[in-house]
Image (spheres, helix red, strand yellow):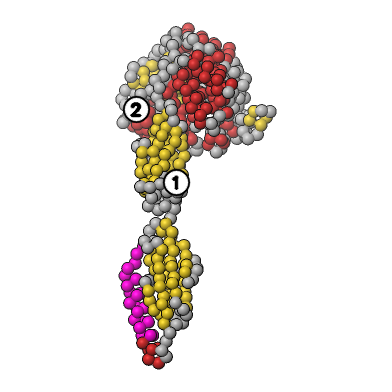
């Protein structure tokens, strides 16, 4: 910072005082004078007060101040006196040449990469080794083969692949690459039923997120502990790939490819809204991670909205009412999801499911929530809850219930008396229900079970066939806390997906599912090998275009080498 007024005033004052001293001393004592020379290095680094070249009487006490310019820092005095003090007090008893040394500030530029690609850094106009204050840096995003640039994040927000920055502070930047769209080929099915998979996005792992989420731990389990070769998790069943994060792109690829080769058309995501309350923020991240890969695989996605989150949002002071909280969530859904080409639609109208609803239970309330939402929205309630949506409800969807000891009868009743009562209805199939809440320290919340196994799944799929269900939801892919998972597990392997393959009538087999599993294993084994990851990207492209033989050849080649 320059302070010219101070500089001039101080100089004039000093000159006046010294002139008086010198003049008075000269009359009587013939005083000794010394030259004091002040130097600034670099010249534009700052100022010294006083400055220039002056003459001072012997034994004069002088205080000198160095003031840095913006972008520089004072690092010390050199020459006749070496010191880091500022201001510096000296006594003049010899000629002095004193240099104030300033150094241009340097800032770290940290760049993290999400996806696969590189960043080319160019310092303009010339390449330098330091990012000094005021340096102009050009960043150019270079995606790897099969990927494309999406955006810059962190301290910079831009969708331009080439950006220029002027470095004036420390910067942390993330470059985001997403898979390049290779048009996927839809798998052929002989069964016309449209099949959805209910998907839970709520898992976190230490390796990806820095902690184990509550859906692996509940109240008393710690995945850092091992029981044999398995981590301790809050479930009676163990994922074939072990506990994971739904923010892991390798997991998203693995899940979605398995679904594709089982003949599943799309996923319906259990969605907890947009607010940073409890683990809702992490659930949103997991949702958006899986969503960004659906189109590349050739699957659609839809939302199952959990309005039970709204009172928690209000209690945290983030919304004035439950209606306001839900309204913001639906505006996010419309802006960020309905706009995507692969959002699930029935007769070109977007589909949303309500769970169940729980908190907003009148048509008037939902009228306020949905007043700015697409009027063609198809909004379905959980079975027997459609009255809670009022005129805004378009039908119901079935779920899993064994409280009357006859879960099949619940489905039969729904198919006989409810599904055709409305414009739209979705059936349900599941492999069973065996929750872990009591063992996980949350109490006996449910109180009933449905045997988990191939027989339960086969019977519920048979009912869907018997009643010619047009839309069927498989419940669920990965609710390990309730034991309703279709995802391959240590206990059941690929059995449940094999049964779904039979139902949908695809030509793929369990060997194709095993190949996808092996792709996941190689992703993890060679996570730090960019060359092999590129080859695995090619395997992915073969899989989404149904070139299974080429995918198998390349994967076997990678494995053998």
- Contact (CB < 8 A) between labels 1 and 2? no
Q: Tag 1's secondary structure?
A: strand
Of residues 377 and 11, the one drawn nearer to the viewer in this rendering: 11
Of residues 171 and 428, the one drawn nearer to the viewer in this rendering: 171
Residue extending farthest right = 228
Give the prevailing secondary structure in the magenta stretch: helix
Task: Note whether 118 is above or below 184 in the view shown.
Answer: below
Residue range of the region highlighted in magenta in the rendering: 1-22
Name the spot of residue 161 as percent of width and height, x first.
Answer: 36, 36
Residue 384 occupies quadrant: top left
Question: Residue at point 42% right, 39% down?
Answer: 120
Q: Which mark is residue 339?
A: 2
Is residue 16 in view? yes
Q: Which mark is residue 109?
A: 1
Q: Earlier in the sequence, mark 1 or mark 2?
A: 1
Of residues 108 and 531, the one drawn nearer to the viewer in this rendering: 531
Question: Residue at point 53% right, 12% down?
Answer: 509
Question: Residue at point 63% right, 35% down?
Answer: 224
Q: Tag 2's secondary structure?
A: loop
Question: Residue at point 32% right, 68% down?
Answer: 4
């Amino acid at each position: 910072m320059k302070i010219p007024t101070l500089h001039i005033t101080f100089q004039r004052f000093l000159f006046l005082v010294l002139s008086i001293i010198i003049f008075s001393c000269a009359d009587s004592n013939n005083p000794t004078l010394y030259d004091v020379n002040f130097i600034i290095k670099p010249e534009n680094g700052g100022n010294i007060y006083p400055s220039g070249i002056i003459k001072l009487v012997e034994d004069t006490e002088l205080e000198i101040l160095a003031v840095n310019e913006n972008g520089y820092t004072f690092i010390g005095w050199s020459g006749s006196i070496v010191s880091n003090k500022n201001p510096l007090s000296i006594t003049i008893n010899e000629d002095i040449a004193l240099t104030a040394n300033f150094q241009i500030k340097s800032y770290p530029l940290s760049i993290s990469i999400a996806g696969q690609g590189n960043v080319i850094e160019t310092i303009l106009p010339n390449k330098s080794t330091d990012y000094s204050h005021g340096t102009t840096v050009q960043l150019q995003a270079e995606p790897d083969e099969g990927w494309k640039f999406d955006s810059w994040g962190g301290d910079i927000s831009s969708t331009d692949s080439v950006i220029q920055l002027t470095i004036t502070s420390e910067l942390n930047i993330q470059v985001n690459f997403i898979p390049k769209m290779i048009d996927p080929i839809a798998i052929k099915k002989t069964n016309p039923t449209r099949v959805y998979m209910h998907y839970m996005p709520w898992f976190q792992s230490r390796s990806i997120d820095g902690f184990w989420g509550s859906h692996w731990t509940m109240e008393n389990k710690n995945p850092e502990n091992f029981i044999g070769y398995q981590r301790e998790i809050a479930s009676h069943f163990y994922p074939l790939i072990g506990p994971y994060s739904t923010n892991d792109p390798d997991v998203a690829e693995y899940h979605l490819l398995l679904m594709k080769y089982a003949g599943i058309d799309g996923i319906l995501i259990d969605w907890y809204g947009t607010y940073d309350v409890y683990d809702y923020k992490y659930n949103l991240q997991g949702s958006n991670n899986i969503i960004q890969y659906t189109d590349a695989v050739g699957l659609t996605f839809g939302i199952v909205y959990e309005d039970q989150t709204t009172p928690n949002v209000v209690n945290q002071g983030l919304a004035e009412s439950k209606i306001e909280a839900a309204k913001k969530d639906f505006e996010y859904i419309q802006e960020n999801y309905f706009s995507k080409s692969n959002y699930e639609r029935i007769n070109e109208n977007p589909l949303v499911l309500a769970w169940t609803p729980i908190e907003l239970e009148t048509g008037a309330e939902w009228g306020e929530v949905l007043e700015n939402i697409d009027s063609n929205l198809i909004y379905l309630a959980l079975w027997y809850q459609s009255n809670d949506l009022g005129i805004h409800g378009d039908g119901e969807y079935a779920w899993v219930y064994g409280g009357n000891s006859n879960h099949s009868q619940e489905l039969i009743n729904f198919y006989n008396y409810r599904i055709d009562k409305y414009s739209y209805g979705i059936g349900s199939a599941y492999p069973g229900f065996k929750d872990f809440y009591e063992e996980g320290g949350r109490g006996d919340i449910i109180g009933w079970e449905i045997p988990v196994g191939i027989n339960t799944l086969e019977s519920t799929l048979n009912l869907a066939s018997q009643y010619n269900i047009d839309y069927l939801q498989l419940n669920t892919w990965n609710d390990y806390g309730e034991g309703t998972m279709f995802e391959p597990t240590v206990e059941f392997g690929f059995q449940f997906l094999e049964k779904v393959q039979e139902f949908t009538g695809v030509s793929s087999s369990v060997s194709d599912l095993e190949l996808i599993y092996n792709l996941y294993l190689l992703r993890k084994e060679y996570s730090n090998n960019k060359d092999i990851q590129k080859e695995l990207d090619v395997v992915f492209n073969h899989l989404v275009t149904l070139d299974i033989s080429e995918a198998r050849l390349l994967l076997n080649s990678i494995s053998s080498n």
